Image (cartoon, rainbow, N blue to C red):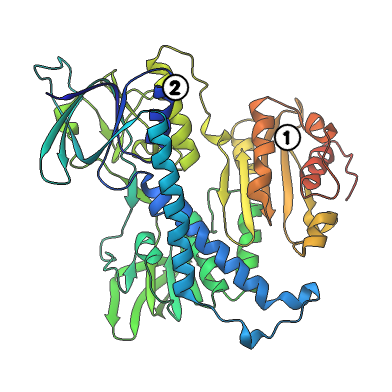
Amino acid sequence: MPIQVDVAVLGGGPGGYTAAIRAAQEGKKVAIVEQAKLGGTCLHQGCIPSKALLRSAEVYATLLHADTYGIKVDREAVKLDFAGVQERKEKTVDQLHRGLQQLMKKHGIEIIRGRGRIIGPSIFSPKSGSLAVELEDGEMESVVSRHLIVATGSRPRLLPGLEADGEQVLTSDDALRMETLPSSMLIAGGGVIGIEWASMLSDFGVSVTLVEAASRVLPGEDSDVSAAVSKALAARGVRILTGAALLPESLRKDGDGVSVAVRKGETEERLQAQRLLVSIGRQANVEGIGLENTDIAVQDGWIKVKPTLQTAEPHIYAIGDVTGGVQLAHAAAHEGIAAVEHLLGLAPHPAAPHRIPRCVYSRPETASVGYTEEQARAAGHDPITARIPFAAIAKAIVQGDPDGFVKVIADRGTQDLLGVHMVGAHVTELIAEASLAQFLDAAPWEVGASFHPHPSLSEGLGDAMLATLGKSLSF
């Protein structure tokens, strides 16, 4: 007999397990089908391991510059134990993985380890959406549910001719498994992943060259943010080429590393490095999951969904990276909750894509929510902007991190809060206040009038809100 549940979830990443928890909270019988480890890309190949490495890189860089805090350290005595760095990363991931497994037990969620495939109607279910699961031991299991949530995620996208070999040409997944650091790294792609790896590797002492096809790095962020990140990385020795295209057919690999030609305008140059990291985006995991047995549409490689997150088959939902929306763990988790609340007949709160916070955990960090200045104009607003440098904020000076700023964008006529963009230490912790402000439709004066403790970095956000009214108290 098949396993029968109310809600089946195909994929155990942040979107999938959050959806499962929400359904279990409402008394539903839930099963997650996951072929790898619970936690998905975020826990095992993305968010968590990369941030663990970034933290080690930050500590190492701080030690090398401890004299700026009045602490004398013999720089020659500061040694990087990269094996120890990797060991700490693995311990961090393992601890969170064990915690997640306990969370599933607490909520009575059944975890089925195997590769799931959607099958058509059967004697057990008149609708397509049942799952045939190939278990780890090769046996087959069937899962029948009233509702199915597809949360199969995504994987690194590659350029033809720049396929990863795991040794010299790497994806971000491969880079996380490096046993030793290369002397030099060429990074293809200046988005979030490329910037984080450029920051981390440069802090570890690796010579980094980054190539981005767009006119600036982090092209989806506010232009002021892009400029500040470029300046900070360049000051640490990272070479950044924008408006440049790698020529895959020119790739050469030998015992010394890799070389590839890059074209910028009419100029062509050959770049060399010990390794090449390709970070040009991600593609959905839609193959081999049985979509051909359904009416589900795939558009441009992504599962097409309605605003309710339903596919063309109303009882089948799709959430997270596989839909091609905002590819962030917290976005997937929010969609998981929304999908479950919709199938329960509740009224989930929709999330406008631009109101989902975006963070880059480089040094310095960046954090944004809402429209960029360019997007605000394109949406028909008359934006007024205010920018407070962290150099004017006492806590930033005390911490030794005065670089960066808070930029607030408001509508000149309505005073609606349109966007907040920050660059600096710990700004990924500050963005939640701006996100809440937009969620509650707070005006800049309301945020500025609320208490921000002194000294704290949050004063920069509060003062930038007041600055849109010409009432800054610090700059």
Q: Amino acid at mark 2?
A: Gln
The residue that mark 2 highlights is 25
Task: Establish if 87 lies above or below 271.
Answer: above
Q: Nearer the viewer, residue 131 or 90?
A: 90
Residue 55 locus on image (x, y percent): 57, 62
The residue that mark 1 highlights is 410
Residue 65 locus on image (x, y percent): 70, 76
Q: Is residue 213 visible?
A: no
Q: Nearer the viewer, residue 112 or 364?
A: 112
Secondary structure type for disc 2: helix
- Mark number, residue 392: none
Q: Is residue 239 visible?
A: yes
Image-based side of 34 in relation to 334, left or right: left
Number of numbered markers: 2
Residue 359 locus on image (x, y percent): 57, 48
User: Crowding at label 1, few (<14), some or many (≥20) Cα neighbours within 10 Å?
Assistant: many
Task: Establish if 122 lies above or below 389.
Answer: above
Task: Establish if 416 lies above or below 186.
Answer: above
Image-based side of 77 in relation to 134, left or right: right
Secondary structure type for disc 1: strand
Residue 299 locus on image (x, y percent): 29, 35
Q: Amino acid at mark 1?
A: Ala
C-alpha gap between disc 1 and disc 2 = 39 Å
User: Crowding at label 2, few (<14), some or many (≥20) Cα neighbours within 10 Å?
Assistant: few
Label whose residue precedes the other's in the sequence (1 or 2):
2
Q: Residue at x 62, y 44 (%)?
A: 368
